[in-house]
Image: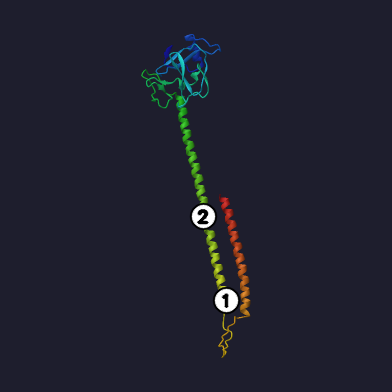
Amino acid sequence: MAMIDACPKNLDEIKNASANLECGFDRFGNSQYVCLPNTEKSSLIEFCYEGLMGLKEKGNCLEIADGKLVTYSCKHFICGCPTEPVRSNEFYKYQACQTINTRHQCYRFDPACPQRNHDNNGISYGIPEGSQNIIIYSMISVILALIVTSIILAYLLWKKNKATTVDHQILEESAQLIGHFEKDSTHGMRQRSDDIIMKPFEVEVDDNSHLVTFEKEEGHNLKQEDTNRRQRNNTETSIESYLQEIADEFSATASKRR
């Protein structure tokens, strides 16, 4: 086993490193070269693993402990954690599992790990530039999405409040119109009822009973009363029709605004 500063990052580098160590292949033809951090996260180690390059469950990194391969959960990493099963010799595809802070002995993509760009020996163990850009773009996208969502919600709320205000104005105007018509109708009926007057037609005093008789003005007044009654019926019918038209118009307007 040899401690190194950085693991190979692509297949060509893997082949060169494997050739330098003279690593073989398992019975399925998989290279037995591995480069992983130790469990203390104090160093990266490369060696030839004498065994099958089996699949490791997603959501885990791979570490070396006394020559054995052990898993380390990386589900809490900022990014870079394997999202599918991966072979023991293919962790070079997941740089988050091979990027460590040897000073603080932690994975650089672990949110709890101090973000230092260089170790004491001047070698960079920080988050790769491409990953930093991904994180920045992701944060910007989330912020923009929140802003757009807030604007849409504010507009919908404003539109709803505006429609409610207009509905209330229409209700108030309709109520005022109905009140005016009812008042005019009541006043007209009272005035017509006063047209039927009682006046003394003849006064006769009987010595025995002392009876005083009155009689309604007949003829013209009776005819006028009949005419007024017909006009009142026509007026009431017109008012009801007009009120119904107002109610229908209000319902249609409210439906359109909603």
Main SS of the magenta part reads helix
> Helix, strand, or loop for circle 1?
helix
Furthest residue in direction left, as rendered: 120
Distance of mark 1 from mark 2, alpha carbons? 41 Å
Residue 191 placement: quadrant? bottom right
Of the pair 135 and 29, the residue shown nearer to us:
29
Could you tell me which secondary element the residue under label 2 belongs to? helix
Q: Residue at x 57, y 74 (%)?
A: 193
Residue farthest along the bottom direction in this orientation: 207
Asked which quadrant contains residue 27, the reply is: top right
Check if mark 1's residue and mark 2's residue have beta carbons within 8 Å.
no
Residue hosting label 2: 168
From the top left corner, tell me how far across and down residue 59 is, in percent: 49, 24
User: Does the segment drawn in magenta span residue 220?
Assistant: no
Would you call the spot at circle 2 few (<14 residues within 10 Å), some (14-19), or many (20 or more)? few
Which stretch is magenta?
A: 193-197
The tag earlier along the polypeptide, 1 or 2, is 2
Image location (x, y in percent) of residue 230: 63, 71
Residue holding disc 1: 195
The amino acid type of the residue labelled 2 equals: His
Does 196 appear in magenta?
yes
**Visible in this render: residue 7?**
no
Residue 239 visible in rendering: yes
Amino acid at circle 1: Asp
Residue located at (62% from left, 70% from top): 231
